[in-house]
Image (cartoon, rainbow, N blue to C red):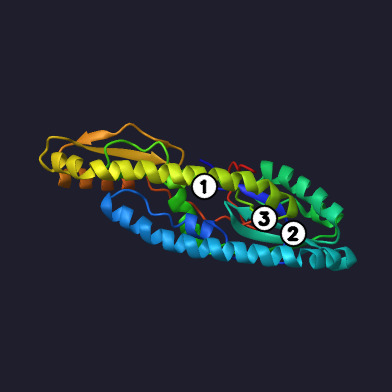
Amino acid sequence: MPTTSWTVRIRWAPWSRVVRLRVAGDRWPRLSEGPFSVALRLVWFLLLTVVLLGCWLELLLVLVLMPVVLVARAAGRGWRLEISARRCCAGVIHVSGLAAARRLRRALREHLGSNSGLDGAEALLAAEKAEFTPVAIDPQRWRLVERRLSPYGRRRWLLWRRKLSFQDAMDSLPSGLGDDPISAIIAIPFLLLFVVLFCGATLELAAQLVLFPFVFLLRMCHALRWPVELVRPNSVEPPDLIRGTVASVHARRELTAAHALRLPVPSLTSAPRETVAVS
């Protein structure tokens, strides 16, 4: 798996938005210990409510200020491009005009598609008279990236693997929601899809919770085995059926430890030489 996935985008807002849905999404509790994880997710919904409210308030403020910002930039204040590694900002480029910003964005995407950083991109920056400022990625923020990418072991407490999940609902939202006027309009159908998936996940979870006491009793009596499965970012491997609660706990922890990822913190000025994926 490539550890670095560079993205280059033009910042339309007057500042890099602080309150984004990923603040809550990256802290989504893993469903690995059944009722305890469900309790953590209920607490997480309180965080989601606060983040969602803050996200829309900040977005509303950005849209109100957008006309003033566009006039200021047209008058010579310039534009900014943000280069991010897996949604962590790693550098900011200041350029004079919108046309130059678009040309540089296209050129940098091609450059980062074949390189691990900005080494050798000096000519691209000089051609547009751009100023590059590297940004150090917070190691704690990068640990959340590692956690999101790492496969982990899970004991399945509920009777079947759910077809709909709250994570799927979160993933249906575009990552650049409201970064420019067009994306704010395009995001409306995605918000409707989010509501549908969220409601479906709630109903399916309610049905499983009704059956949960009976399933738990059968497993404690060793009449049913515990499914222990490896959860990857986009798939779940077939489970191993483990008899006994203690044995299933040990199996889950060993599975998580065996597949944990340790990724170097990327840098545009000293990036590791490896294959990158540009989105």
Query: Relative to residue 245, is residue 49 depicted above or below?
Result: below
Cα distance in 3D space between marks 1 and 3: 18 Å
Q: Secondary structure at mark 1?
A: helix
| Residue annotated with mark 2 | 12
Earlier-in-chain disc, 3 versus 2: 2
Query: Whole-Å distance between the Cαs marked 1 and 2?
Result: 27 Å
Would you call the spot at circle 2 few (<14 residues within 10 Å), some (14-19), or many (20 or more)?
A: many
Q: Looking at the picture, how far across and down is residue 38, in whole percent?
A: 32, 53
Amino acid identity at mark 1: Val
Residue 142, which numbered label? none
Mark 3 crowd level (few <14, some 14–19, many ≥20, 10 Å Cα): many
Give the farthest residue toward the left: 221
Percent from the top left, x then y, of residue 151?
39, 44
Q: Nearer the viewer, mark 1 or mark 2?
A: 1
Camera-side residue of 278 and 179: 179
Q: Residue at x 74, y 54 (%)?
A: 181
Can I make out residue 135 in this image? Answer: no
**Is residue 33 shown left or right of residue 129?**
left
- Point out which mark residue 195 bears: 1
Between discs 1 and 2, the one toward the N terminus: 2
Image quadrant where residue 243 sits: top left
Side of 104 where 189 appears, left or right? left
Q: Is residue 273 above or below residue 237?
A: below
Three-letter code for the amino acid on which mark 3 is drawn:
Gly
Left or right of 218 in this view: 254: right
The count of marks equals 3
Q: Which mark is residue 178?
A: 3
Q: Is residue 58 visible?
A: yes
Query: Which residue is farthest top?
Result: 238
Residue drawn at x 64%, y 48% as measured from the top left: 188
Tag nearer the camera, 3 or 2: 3
| Residue at horizontal 71 percent and vertical 52 percent from the top | 9
